[in-house]
Image (spheres, coloured by chain):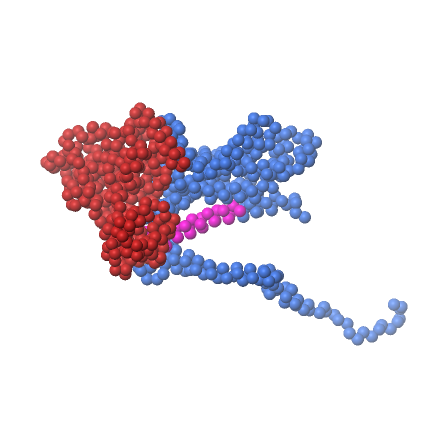
Chain colours: A red, B blue
Amino acid sequence: MKRIVAALAFGLGATLLAGAAQAQGTLNSIKQKGYISCGSNPGLAGFGVPDAQGRWTGLDVDFCRALSAAIFNDVTKVRFIPLSAKDRFTALQSGEVDLLSRNTTWSMSRDTTLGLDFPAVNFYDGQGFMVKKKLGVTSAKQLDGASVCTQQGTTTELNLADYFRANKMKYEVVAFASADETFKAYDSGRCDAFTTDASGLYAERLRASAPDDNIVLPEIISKEPLAPAVRQGDAQWADIVRWTHYAMLNAEEAGITQANVDQMAKSTDNPDIKRILGTEGKYGADLGLTSDWAYRIIKLVGNYGEVFERNVGQGSPLKIQRGLNALWSKGGLQYGPPIR
Amino acid sequence: MTAGSQPLPLAFVRREAVPASPPPSLVSGPLAWLRQNLFSSPANAVMTLAALAVIALVVPPLLRFLVLDAVWTGQNRDACRPEVVGRPVGACWAFVANKINYFIYGSYPIEERWRPNVFFALMAFGVGWLLWLDAPRRAWGALYFFVVFPLVSYGLLAGVPALGLPSVPTALWGGMLVTLIVSLVGIVASLPLGILLALGRRSRLPIVRLFCVIFIEFWRGVPLITVLFMANVMLPLFLPGDVTVDRLARPLVGIALFSAAYMAEVVRGGLQAIPRGQTEGAMSLGLSPWHRMRLIILPQALRIVIPGIVNSFIALFKDTSLVSIVGIFDFIRTIESARVDPAWAAPTVVMTGYAFAALFYFVFCFGMSRYARFMERRLAAGQTR
């Protein structure tokens, strides 16, 4: 019943908004109101957290700032609207937010039934395991017979069941209602292993009573491509979101950083870099932006590598490895199609 | 006695009173008090012992966690990590100290934070003026609190660019600032609205009565969380694309209407309790209906329902934390957001955050309830013997 109501609501929203979107694209409405409404996570380590003065930092937050930089040449024209996992899609559908940038897994059913588009994957996540070092386990394959702490009613629990069944291993689930409880139980020795998305494992490990006594196992047992989401039916806006991510990837690949972007813009002869920075060609204009759109992103926010390291990588307490999120040229999955 | 008669020889006349001997120890004194209050019957004794056992079980660990083992200063997570500090760590108050500005102002721009401060001061002034019963010119105080203060605060917090106050979008407001605004608006709007609705529900005019009944039953029949969800997530679906209502204003209106419906029923309870003779007596004095209500009925009815009204206020104050679910950064939400900060990842940070929240809500709710007790006693002065 709930689903039917939700579906009806989405359908209604989609119809109403299709009209609104045709009359006036998202980009125009953003320019008109003067800011981007960014549906964000109310608090997720490395992806969106407030600092002591209430300024937001994080990978997903910086993505919205990058959009703001591209459109307004100013990173502050974003209003973050924190959304829970339950109401995020409704909020996007109803036009309350212009995009979701809150660690949303891109799955086929979400893409096809909710009237959404996922323009690009800005973080490849996946479910992993954490165990106590003293257990002497180095691979998830050795977890036969282990008790695993997990959160009730999540896909995490289902993935766990699939993995152990596929590998013909026995296990015991110890499930809890909230993420906090789950980790507390693991930390106090209630179970041998703790499972959630890998990015979450690193964040939780910091909270353990002895972080160094815990290790994250190398196996990733599910695909969780985290992507920003936009409403279906506004191709221009989806393009802007997509190419904002790709511009940051291309900048990293070309070695353009926040620090050297000015000098690069002036002195380089490399045609790739010239096209990215808008000193050659009018690629930004076709997006409805200025030709220096990517320059603004890199200057004000940084390239993908910088944003990654600053928020979740070596420059942050989380120290997440690049792994799947390395550039394709370094063995990862992040691949930015050429700007030309 | 005849003159000249010999006075009788008095063998012994006591000239001072005998010093009173102490009462038996089981009638007064600490032992008697214990016996009377704590051990008056076997059942009572068992309960006393059980209560003592619970206190002994709960209080020392709580004290150890909150005070003795607590960490008071520090710049980051290292301050609250047992293996770094080298001792068991209780509450991490350093975390609260570090984030306190975020808990108070949310993301309100740093250079503009004097404005919320002025707002807090204006509010304290207005509340003090109204609640201090012997304050001078309390009618002006009411005017200030219900008219001047809201207008000034709105201009102050949201900004008036014409007066050199840059505008601050409500999306940046947060923390205790938002919690206080939401509950203040709810409390201040719900009482007058509730009284009107309660009177309307008892009115003899069918349309007015029907409207009030429908209004009250509708808002009481819907969970607050649904109201908030409709206001903040679904409402944009029904409005034309270019019409937007402020995200903070929507739950404010929702909460005010919601609590007004509850208030109406509380007030109606008081009105029902006033005997018909009061109205008739007022009529016989020749008072107009308006005066009957204002001078005779309402003062008595409201005094009766003070516990109910305060109950609603306290419930409302705590219910404001529900706005966090629809993406308003109230006090609870700021704590929940701050506690995931990896720079402060330590085992006890989460509990410390919630302990701080509990303290904040307790201070306010307890304050309200004490003030209400005082009001009740004062207003009931005519009934005590």
Give the quadrant of the N terminus of chain A: top left
Q: Can you see residue B191?
A: no
Residue A44 place in picture, x, y as percent: 32, 45
Report the front residue among A26 and B18.
A26
Residue A299 rendering spot, x and y as whole percentages? 21, 38
The residue under the point 21% across, 33% down is A293
Q: Nearer the viewer, residue B117 or A238?
A: A238
Give the residue drawn at x 32%, y 55%: A147
Left or right: B308, with B251 as reference point: right
Magenta span dominant secondary structure? helix
Image-based side of B19 in relation to B152, left or right: right
Identity of the residue furthest to the front in this view: A168
Q: Is A133 situated above or below B259? A: below
Q: Quadrant of residue A190?
A: bottom left
Could you tell me if residue A46 is visible in this image?
yes
- What stretch of residues is rendered in magenta? B343-369
Front in this rendered view, residue B136 or A156 = A156
Q: Is residue A136 in the magenta section?
A: no
Q: Quadrant of the C terminus of chain A?
A: top left
Image quadrant assignment for residue A105:
top left
Residue B146: give x, y in percent of width and height.
Answer: 50, 35
Which residue is nearer to you in this view: A331 or B136?
Answer: A331
Measured along the vertical axis of the image, is residue B188 above or below residue B73? above
User: Is residue B361 inside the magenta stretch?
Assistant: yes
Q: Residue at x 37, y 42 (%)?
A: B106
In the depicted structure, whether residue A190 falls above or below residue A63? below
